[in-house]
Amino acid sequence: MGKRHLLSAYEALGGDQACPLRLEITRRPYFLAPRMLGQTLEESGPNRVWGRRWSTGEDSPVIELGREAGFSFNRDAIMSDTMRSHRLILFAAKRGKGEPMADVLATLYFEEGQPLAETATLLEAARRVGLPHAEVESYLGGTDGQAEVLGQYLRVLELGIPSIPCAIMTAAGAGTTVHGSASVEVFRMALEKLITHFESLPADAKDPPPHKLAALFGPGSWAPSETPLEDVRRAFEADWQKQRSLDGGTDEKIRARM
C-alpha cells in the first residue's frame, strides 16, 4: 500500500520530469513473526492466521486500507518464518529483480494466502519473475544471505523502527520516516520536506554527511551479522516490550501503526 501511495505522491510533485529529487525504492527486511525464525510451518503452527490477529471482518481497517490501495487481502494467510523469503529478495536483487520479487511475494502471501515458509511458494515466486528454478532451489536449501538479512534486521531495530510498513526517506543528509499505511497527502508532505532541505543547500556546497537512516542503504549496508537466531528473537522481544511500555502496555496501539 505504502509504495503505491509514495509513487502517487512523487508523480504529483512532477516525478522524474520536474521533481528535484529522484526516487529510488529499495526493500529492507523486517520479520513480522520473529518468534518463528528458523521454524518450519509445522513447528510454528499452521493455524497462525494473520487475519484473525490483525483484522476482524470484511470491514476491518486493514481490509479497507487494502481496498483503497488496490489490494484484496486474504484473511486466511498463514503467518510463518520469512527468513527464506527475505533471502530470496536479496538473491533476486543481485540479479536486478529485487523489487518485482518483493511484489510477487506480497501477492502470493497477502492476496493468495500462500505461506512464505513453504518452498513451493518461493519457487513459484521465482518462476513468476523469471529466475532459474534449479539455481533458486539450491540457494533456498542453503544459508547464503542469512547473515546479511539478520544484519539488516538488527540495524532496523537499532534505528528505532518499531513496526511496518515504514517508509524511510533520505536525501542530501536529511531523513524522515512515514509509518503505517499513510495517505498520498502524508507522503507528499514528507517529500516536500526533503525537497525544501535539498533546495536550501548552496549550489557549491559539499555533499553533507548522510543521515543516520541512510545506514540502511548503500553498498556497505548489507554487512553480515554473526548473531544467533535465538539472540535475534530476544532482541525483537526486548524492542516489542519497549514499544508496549511507550504505548501504555497495549499491543493494539502498536498494531494501529501498521
Image: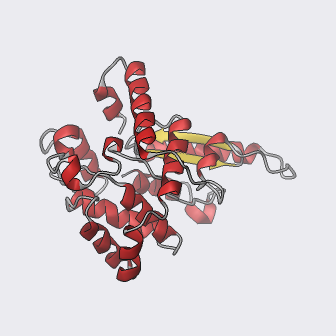
Q: Which percent across, then down, holds residue 18?
A: 62, 61
Q: Nearer the viewer, residue 222 or 10?
A: 222
Q: Residue at x 34, y 45 (%)?
A: 32
Residue 78, can we see it?
no
- Residue farthest left in this picture: 57
Give the image quarter of residue 118. bottom left
Q: Residue at x 20, y 38 (%)?
A: 53
Q: Residue at x 63, y 47 (%)?
A: 215
Residue 146, can we see it?
yes
In this view, 94 is above or below 33: below
Quadrant (top left, top right, bottom left, bottom right) of the C terminus: top left
- Residue farthest top in this picture: 248
247 lies left or right of 219: left
80 lies left or right of 27: left
Q: Nearer the viewer, residue 227 or 178?
A: 227
Q: Nearer the viewer, residue 52 or 182?
A: 52
In this view, 83 is above or below 228: below
181 lies left or right of 28: left
Q: Which percent across, then down, holds residue 27?
A: 48, 57
- Residue farthest right in this picture: 204
In this view, 31 is above or below 14: above
Q: Which percent across, then down, holds residue 91?
A: 47, 69
Q: Nearer the viewer, residue 130 or 116?
A: 116
41 lies left or right of 189: left
Q: Which percent across, then down, holds residue 138?
A: 39, 75
Q: How many marks?
A: 0
What colour-coding does the image apply?
secondary structure
Q: Residue at x 28, y 46 (%)?
A: 65
Give the image quarter of residue 181. top left
